[in-house]
């Protein structure tokens, strides 16, 4: 039995501002944006090439905006990923090298933090 992670809730204070950041700056795909009721708006965004999406909106989580840390995506070329993010206006860290991979870091407007990792070649 496969258990595939499909969706992670990311709490934000301003849905439109967060959606614009993730789509226009981080390059995520806008999959859905539905107002279900006066209390619920569901926005699903997916990083390019990912099988897992994030959900932002209203009425979908009781987490405090900006409280998510350690979200991580994996890329094949960390330098190209950093250049793309920076070129889109994302405030992104310099590349950091560790034995377990090369990383850059960024946060959304609320402070939810992301790591971008290039996994080292496996022997």
Image: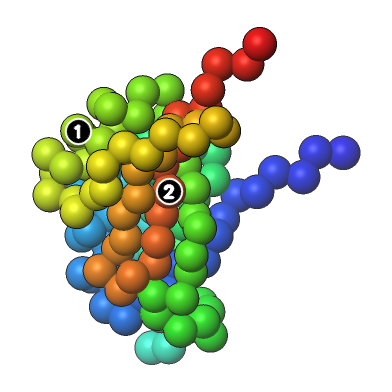
The residue shown at (21%, 69%) is 17
Element assignment for label 2: strand
In what element is the residue under mark 1? Answer: helix
The residue under label 1 is 83
Vertical side of 31 occupied by 14: above or below: below
Q: How many marks?
A: 2
Q: How many C-alpha atoms fall within 10 Å of the one at disc 2: few (<14), some, or many (≥20)? A: some
Q: Which of 23 and 32 is in front in this view?
A: 23
Q: Quadrant of the C terminus?
A: top right
Q: Which colour scheme is used?
A: rainbow
| Residue 29 seen | no
Tell which residue pokes out farthest to the right in this image: 1
Local crowd at mark 1 within 10 Å, few (<14), some, or many (≥20)?
few
From the viewer's perspective, is residue 82 above or below residue 70?
Answer: above
For the point 60% across and 49% down, which residue is it? 6
The numbered mark, 1 or 2, whose residue comes first in the sequence reads: 1
Give the answer, above or below, for where 48 lies relative to 23. above
The single residue placed furthest to the top in the displayed view is: 123
Residue 111 x %, y %: 33, 70
Say which residue appears at 77% left-offset and 45% top-offset: 3
Q: What's the CA distance linking mark 1 and mark 2?
A: 15 Å
Residue 68 seen in the current view: yes
The x and y percentages for residue 40 are 44, 81
Viewer-side residue, 93 vs 28? 93
Q: Quadrant of residue 113?
A: bottom left
Residue that carries the numbered disc 2 in the rendered image: 115
């Amino acid at each position: 039995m496969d258990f595939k992670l499909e969706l992670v809730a990311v709490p934000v204070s301003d849905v439109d501002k967060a959606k614009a950041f993730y789509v226009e700056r981080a390059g995520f795909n806008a999959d859905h944006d539905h107002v279900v009721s006066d209390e619920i708006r569901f926005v699903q965004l997916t990083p390019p090439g990912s099988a897992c999406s994030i959900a932002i909106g209203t009425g979908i989580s009781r987490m405090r905006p900006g409280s998510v840390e350690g979200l991580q995506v994996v890329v094949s070329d960390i330098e190209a990923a950093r250049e793309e993010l920076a070129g889109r206006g994302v405030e992104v860290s310099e590349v950091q090298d560790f034995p377990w991979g090369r990383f850059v870091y960024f946060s959304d407007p609320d402070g939810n933090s992301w790591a971008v990792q290039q996994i080292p070649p496996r022997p």
